[in-house]
Image (cartoon, rainbow, N blue to C red):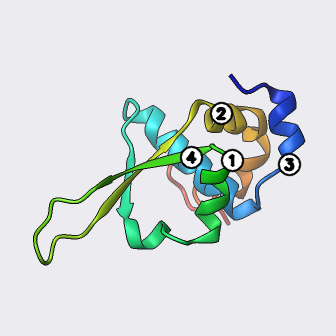
């Protein structure tokens, strides 16, 4: 398992990446490890997500139900390393989110 020292040595993600990772982690925890589904085309070759995949903070599974008009869906899953990252930096990430924990928009 990745240690805090290894995560610190890799450096921080961008503010936007941290918020994305944190939001997915919160949703996963709240819904009992349920993934966040997005269109594969939204994350494929997207540098915003690619760094998180490369650093193994975030992973995904692809679901293609076939058919001519069926979209290909990616289920995003925060890894244990990603969860640890969110725990380590959660106090700094939380104020960056557009919505607070009670669902109110931040000013």
The secondary element bearing badge 1 is classed as loop
Q: Is residue 23 left or right of residue 73?
A: right
Q: Which numbered circle lies on residue 55?
A: 1
Report the residue at 36% width, 38% height from top.
34
The secondary element bearing badge 4 is classed as strand
The residue under label 4 is 58
- In the rendered image of this protein, does residue 63 appear above or below residue 67? above
Give the CA separation, mark 2 to mark 4: 8 Å
Look at the numbered discs 1 and 4 and tell me whether their residues touch, using CB distance below 8 Å. no
The residue under label 3 is 11
Disc with the residue nearer the chain's start (3 vs 2): 3
- In the rendered image of this protein, does residue 42 appear above or below residue 57? below
Residue furthest out toward the left = 67
Report the residue at 28% width, 65% height from top.
72
Q: Which numbered circle lies on residue 81?
A: 2
Nearer to us in this view, 10 or 33: 10
The C terminus - image quarter: bottom right
Look at the numbered discs 1 and 2 and tell me whether their residues touch, using CB distance below 8 Å. yes
- In the rendered image of this protein, does residue 32 appear above or below residue 17? above
Residue furthest out toward the bottom = 69
Q: x, y percentage for residue 36?
A: 40, 50
Give the CA separation, mark 3 to mark 1: 10 Å
Give the CA separation, mark 1 to mark 2: 9 Å
| Crowd around label 3: few <14 · some 14–19 · many ≥20 (10 Å) | few
Q: x, y percentage for residue 94?
A: 69, 47
Foreground label between 1 and 2:
1
Foreground label between 1 and 4:
1
Do we see residue 102 in this rendering? no
Disc with the residue nearer the chain's start (2 vs 4): 4
The secondary element bearing badge 3 is classed as loop
Report the residue at 10% width, 70% height from top.
67
The secondary element bearing badge 2 is classed as helix
């Amino acid at each position: 398992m990745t240690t805090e020292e290894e995560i610190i040595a890799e450096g921080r993600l961008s503010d936007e990446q941290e918020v994305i990772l944190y939001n997915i982690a919160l949703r996963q925890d709240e819904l009992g490890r349920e993934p966040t589904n997005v269109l594969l085309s939204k994350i494929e070759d997207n540098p915003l997500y690619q760094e998180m995949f490369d650093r193994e903070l975030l992973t995904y599974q692809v679901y293609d139900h076939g058919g001519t008009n069926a979209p290909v869906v990616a289920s995003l899953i925060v890894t244990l390393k990603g969860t640890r990252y969110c725990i380590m930096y959660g106090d700094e990430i939380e104020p960056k989110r557009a919505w607070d924990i009670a669902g109110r928009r931040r000013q």
